[in-house]
Image: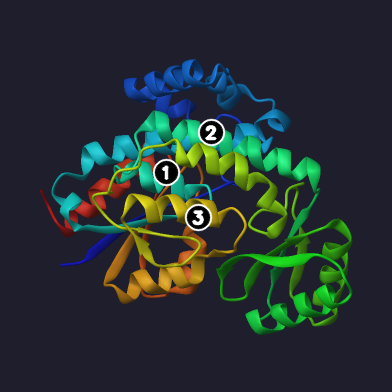
Amino acid sequence: MKSLAIVFPGQGCQFVGMGSDLCCQFAHARERLEQADDILGLHLSRLCADGPEEILNDTANTQPAIYVTTMILWEALAEQLNGARPRIAMSAGHSLGEYAALTAAGALDFEQGLRLVRERGLAMAEAGNRAPGRMAAIIGLSDEIVHEIMAQVQGEKLNVWVANYNSPGQVVIAGCNEGLVRAVELAQERKAKRAIPLAVSVACHTPLMRAAAERLGAALAATEFRAPWIPIVSNATARPVSEPEEIRQALLRQLSSPVRWVESIQNMAKAGVTTMIEVGPKSVVTGLVRRISREMDVLTATDEASLLTVTETLAEVAPA
């Protein structure tokens, strides 16, 4: 029997209008958005539907907006999984998506997860104000060459690190402005296919985020985690976690250490996962998964139509 994993995207999958089609079709979607507005004291529903884009893209707003929309999609999918649900072996989320994975697996309830991602976004924004940073995607170089570039830039007393190992030949780096400029310059000299500065002002998953650790750590310490019904593959270690305290520590570590997405997908494949379903407002990690493991079947659940396609496909493989 094939083994399933559910994966969730992080920042970058947001867009103005996300969730609007779901609100038209699912009563629980409207209820979740109204609940989020009440919990946060923020018109998140209006922001998702109408923007403006620059406010939605503020990381303190982006993170809860993505989380809520993702959970609406997951709850709609979970209702329709029927006989396929026992085949779900594990889950993972890319960066922010790890919180959705934990909620979907029962380690957090919806409100706990929402409060945590809002606090995470605020903590990261605050850290970014204290120590401004940038990020860039390096495409077409091996990890080894990227590591050599990082070492050279750090040797020049500039702060820059690997932030995401996204797929073979795609690494995201982050650090101070001068460090990023120098690293991009060196990547181009080493014949990178592309070296693309990203439109963010926060150096996610680097030591520059340690300033956010105290605030997020306090929120994590005050949150009661439960053992999930499936293991969650941690960004920080690329290994499954299932005990509440190790989950708490993994989330705190994730803040300032790189996302080990390549290893995470490889380890899930080694554990027997043959099919993954990406659940989120827009498909982001599906392409990464396919580049990491060509044998992996990947389905996407981003809107009402794709939810139906996923459930029909799974029913053909393992009818209820």
Q: Is residue 187 visible?
A: yes
Q: Secondary structure at mark 2?
A: helix
Name which residue lies at 28% across and 49% down.
228
Give percent across and percent down for residue 66: 52, 37
Q: CA distance from mark 1 to mark 3?
A: 10 Å
Badge 1 density bin: few <14, some 14–19, many ≥20, Cα 10 Å: many
Q: Residue furthest left?
A: 320
Give percent across and percent down for residue 175: 77, 60
Give percent across and percent down for residue 165: 58, 68
The residue under label 2 is 64
The residue under label 3 is 94
Give percent across and percent down for residue 27: 33, 20
Residue type at tag 2 = Pro
Q: CA distance from mark 2 to mark 1?
A: 10 Å
- Give whichever of discs 1 and 3 has the lower sequence position: 3
The residue under label 1 is 100
Q: Secondary structure at mark 3?
A: loop
Badge 2 density bin: few <14, some 14–19, many ≥20, Cα 10 Å: many
Name which residue lies at 62% across and 22% down.
50
- Image height check: is 161 above or below 219? below
Name which residue lies at 30% across and 46% down.
105
Residue type at tag 3 = His
Badge 3 density bin: few <14, some 14–19, many ≥20, Cα 10 Å: many
Residue type at tag 1 = Ala
- Give whichever of discs 2 and 1 has the lower sequence position: 2
Q: Are marks 1 and 3 in contact (CB under 8 Å)?
A: no
